[in-house]
Image (cartoon, grey):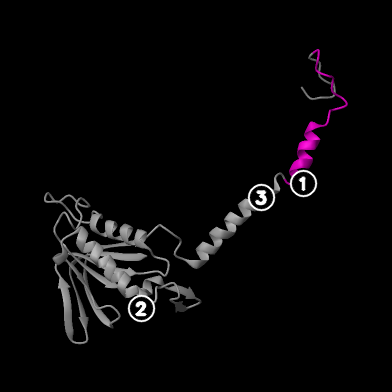
């Protein structure tokens, strides 16, 4: 799962001509759900959104307080385009969870966030609608998060799998032919050297 978290002085969502929700100071969060996301991803993203220290304290010290500690609002907007994979210049969204699965998953995430915080302070847009999101970024402060429970890029996953396969093949083969040859050469006795029993060394050896 990917999230773009923006500290805002105000934010709102409009569908058509109707403003369906708005918040004052707090966070506006764009959420992109992957086909591979699980409850672990939900737990991670919710915990980070609510606990990131993006606000000042009462004394003006920056990066000291979370949205929960300041009793600020959170506006969440489902954003499948965050799961974009570019094919040349064309965006491909096959990594995004299909809408029929993503909607209940997104609602479940909101429920988790409301359970962890104050339900009345968690707002959201309209899932699947063509929305106008109005954000007044404060700072600007923008944080990008990706849940770490699995690679989210298919090419990255393939690369990691290939690296692991190469490591396993190397272990199973043992030392290479060249390595064994080097070891064999090192173990052959030097005909010009003494046995070493009396501490002598060959006169041909360099001191």
Tell which circle, 3 or 1, labels the residue nearer the N-terminal end. 3
Q: Residues within 10 Å of mark 1 (few under 14, many from 20)?
A: few
User: Which mark, residue 170?
Assistant: 3
Q: CA distance from mark 3 to mark 1?
A: 12 Å
Q: Judge whether 191 appears above or below 172 on screen.
A: above
Tell which circle, 2 or 3, labels the residue nearer the N-terminal end. 2
Residue extent of the magenta highlight: 176-198
Question: Quick one: which residue is furthest to the bottom in this view?
Answer: 17
Residue 183 magenta-drawn? yes
Question: Quick one: which residue is furthest to the top in this view?
Answer: 198
The quarter of the rendered structure image containing the C terminus is top right
Kindly identify the residue that appears in the image at 28 percent across and 82 percent down: 129
Kindly identify the residue that appears in the image at 26 percent across and 65 percent down: 6
Residue 130, position as x, y percentages in the image: 28, 83
Q: Say which residue label 2 marks.
A: 100
Q: Judge whether 51 appears above or below 199 on screen.
A: below
Residue 97 visible in the displayed image: yes
């Amino acid at each position: 799962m990917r999230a773009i978290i923006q500290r805002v002085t105000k934010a709102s969502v409009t569908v058509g001509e109707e403003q369906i929700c708005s918040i004052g100071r707090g966070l506006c969060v764009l959420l992109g759900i992957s086909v591979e996301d699980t409850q672990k991803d939900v737990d991670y993203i919710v915990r980070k959104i609510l606990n990131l220290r993006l606000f000042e304290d009462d004394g003006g010290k920056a990066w000291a307080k979370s949205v929960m500690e300041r009793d600020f609002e959170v506006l969440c907007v489902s954003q499948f385009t965050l799961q974009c994979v570019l094919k040349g210049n064309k965006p491909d969204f096959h990594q995004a969870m299909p809408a029929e699965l993503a909607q209940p998953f997104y609602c479940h995430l909101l429920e988790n966030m409301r359970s962890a915080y104050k339900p009345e302070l968690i707002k959201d847009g309209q899932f699947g609608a063509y929305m106008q999101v109005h954000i007044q970024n404060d700072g600007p402060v923008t944080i990008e998060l990706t849940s770490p429970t699995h690679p989210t890029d298919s090419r990255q996953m393939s690369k990691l799998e290939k690296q692991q396969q190469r490591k396993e093949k190397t272990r199973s083969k043992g030392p290479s032919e060249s390595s064994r040859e080097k070891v064999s050469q090192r173990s052959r006795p030097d005909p010009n050297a003494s046995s070493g029993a009396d501490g002598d060394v060959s006169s041909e050896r360099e001191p």
